[in-house]
Amino acid sequence: MLSLRLYNAREQRLADMEREFARQRANDELIKAQLQVHFENVQLIADTTTLPHAMQYLRSRIAEELDLSQLTERLQKGKGKPYTLTSSEKLELWDRLKILSFTQMVVSLWAVTILSLYIKVQVNILGRHLYIDTARGLGSSLLLENVDLIDRDDQQKFLAGADFLANNGLLALISNIQAVVTEVIEGKKLIDLFNTTSFHETVMQILDKFMSVGSLHQWIDYLMSEDSGHSKLGTSSSIDDTVLPNSTNFDQLMVEARTVLSSAEFGKIMGISLKVAVDALVEDMEAQCQSTGASLTSGIPLAKLLSRVMQIVPSLLREASQNQFIQIIWTVPEVELFFTLLYANNLVD
């Protein structure tokens, strides 16, 4: 009888354990499903609110800081009234227009590309913390320890950081890109022919020179305050190593963002994305030329190219849902894989 009772007690314990394991598995499956819902909600906010707002604000700020209308108006008046401008004045105006139109285009291209990637990074980081929130609420075995929950105010403040570029980083970005543009195209004459190859090479040369100026990750300071996570980051090279003592939840988010942006993997994705954006730019420019009976493939004078350069900027800064450059970047296989892996890595300790 004793052995039977022991046997029954053992069987009961096994049955209880199996029920507990089944309950835990059900909890974990529920968490995964709720996690996907949470993440899609954050993604929806980013796509419908954060990125469109950031793009609209960026567009207005670039138009404000790089307004070329006075230059073009003076040149138009000089064309209609030949004696209103001297030859040297005309040449000076054309030279300024040459530098500033390329500056406006490259600033827009770089800003749109990097800002769209940065907002994707923000969404992935918030996805991790939403996972932790959901897992704690349901008592998951997948729970990550020692990580504070991020409240809604900190989430919104973190996403609002997407406006830092337009608010704080834009003037330095314009100044530094303009310096590189001047170096690259100052010696080019208005009668010089540009074709698809030389135009592509010129834009890539400007971007490559700009990205090589200063320290390796200096470009991050256009997107984030220099002290946002920078002094706290230390030698950390992984998002899993960035749980810091004595820091606020918002600080933690910023440190994690800087960690991702500083990674070699993100550097590769940024380079690929800029190259893809330039390829799309050249294709768009060629289509624009063909619509007016010209051919960038055969070559057009720089003087005529400048008007096309200025006309391409609105399409670069178009709203995200209608912006072909952003859509093309987000569908590049390497970019999709990077964010898939980043999201997956955010879910494991």
Image: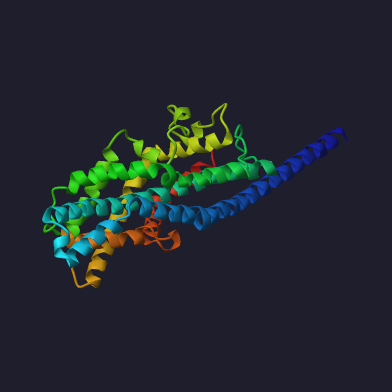
Say if residue 299 shows up in the picture: no
Which residue is situated farthest in the right direction here?
1
| 322 sits left or right of 303 in the view | right
State the residue in front, 278 or 94.
Answer: 94
Percent from the top left, x then y, of residue 323?
40, 61
How many marks do you count on the picture? Answer: 0
Question: Can you say which quadrant of the picture contains the C terminus?
Answer: top right
Percent from the top left, x then y, of residue 34?
63, 52
The residue lying at 53 percent from left, 34 percent from top is: 251
| 95 sits left or right of 156 in the view | left
95 in relation to 75, above or below: above
Percent from the top left, x then y, of residue 82?
14, 64
Q: How is the image coloured?
A: rainbow
Say if residue 256 shows up in the picture: yes
Question: Can you say which quadrant of the picture contains the N terminus?
Answer: top right
| 244 sits left or right of 15 in the view | left
The residue lying at 23 percent from left, 65 percent from top is: 286
